[in-house]
Image (cartoon, rainbow, N blue to C red):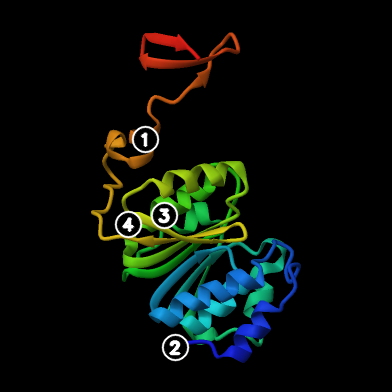
Amino acid sequence: MTANSDILNQIAALPGDWHGAGCLSGDVIKAIKSYSDQKPFEASLETGVGKSTLILSHCSKKHYAFAADFGGSVTRTRNSELLNAGSVIFIEGLCQKTIPAHDFPEKLDFALIDGGHGYPFPELDYYFIYPHLRPGAILAVDDIHIPTIHNMFAVLREDEMFDLDRIVGTTAFFRRTNAETFDPLGDGWWLQGYNQKYYPAPIIDETGKMVQYTSPGNKIPL
């Protein structure tokens, strides 16, 4: 299943205020379709709905859309003539509640994190999604210009499970590698690439000075 060029162009041309919760740019919509052109999606998922839901409804045999109706986003998407409704399963409600309760019946070929943007909500989305990405799957993270989301982007960029494929505007596209899935019920922080590269992190201590801890009880000024 794939969107033809006419449908793609119509979706990409929808205005940025198509609904009140904010929308992806036309370039990001075209990037999503380009991945399905490489290999059609059997199953996909997103947090937040809108123009991405429209294009994914044509690019995926089964698409899961998790979102609350902020800004009329769900209502506008459901009622759009550009939606291929037969391929979309809407799971309405706050993603912080709906994703942990969801039973994932199959591995995912594509996932977009674009739900709640306040900290730590994008991280919660990621936590419950990443174990279900098959090797070669695409993980898209929107709004990486927001500092807290950029922090997650920086961590993923150093993670052996992902290769950064490209950045379109403020949306990053990662490709899942063949690396073993990081145990979601374990720890192993010292094995993760970001921590290996940047440990120990400098901090501002109680006096306002920048210091670095070489051990829990030993700090050096920077």
The kind of residue tagged 4 is Pro
Task: Please identify, in this view, whether the residue under mark 4 or under mark 3 is nearer the observer.
Answer: 4
Q: How far apart are marks 1 and 2 (CA)?
A: 41 Å
Residue matched to label 1: 197
Which quadrant of the figure has residue 43? Answer: bottom left
The kind of residue tagged 1 is Lys
Q: Which of marks 4 and 3 is nearer the N terminus?
A: 3
Q: Distance between the residues labelled 2 and 4?
A: 25 Å
- CA neighbours of label 2 inside 10 A, class few (<14), some (14 to 19), many (20+): some
Viewed as shown, does residue 207 lie left or right of 16? left
Q: Position of residue 167 (x, y in %)?
A: 54, 60
Report the residue at 68% width, 61% height from top: 70
Residue matched to label 4: 131
Which residue occupies the foreground of this view, 185 or 177?
177
Residue matched to label 3: 100
The kind of residue tagged 3 is Pro
Q: Earlier in the sequence, mark 1 or mark 4?
A: 4
Number of numbered tags placed on the structure image: 4
Q: Which of marks 3 and 1 is nearer the N terminus?
A: 3
Report the residue at 44% width, 17% height from top: 212
Residue matched to label 2: 1
Q: Which of marks 2 and 4 is nearer the N terminus?
A: 2
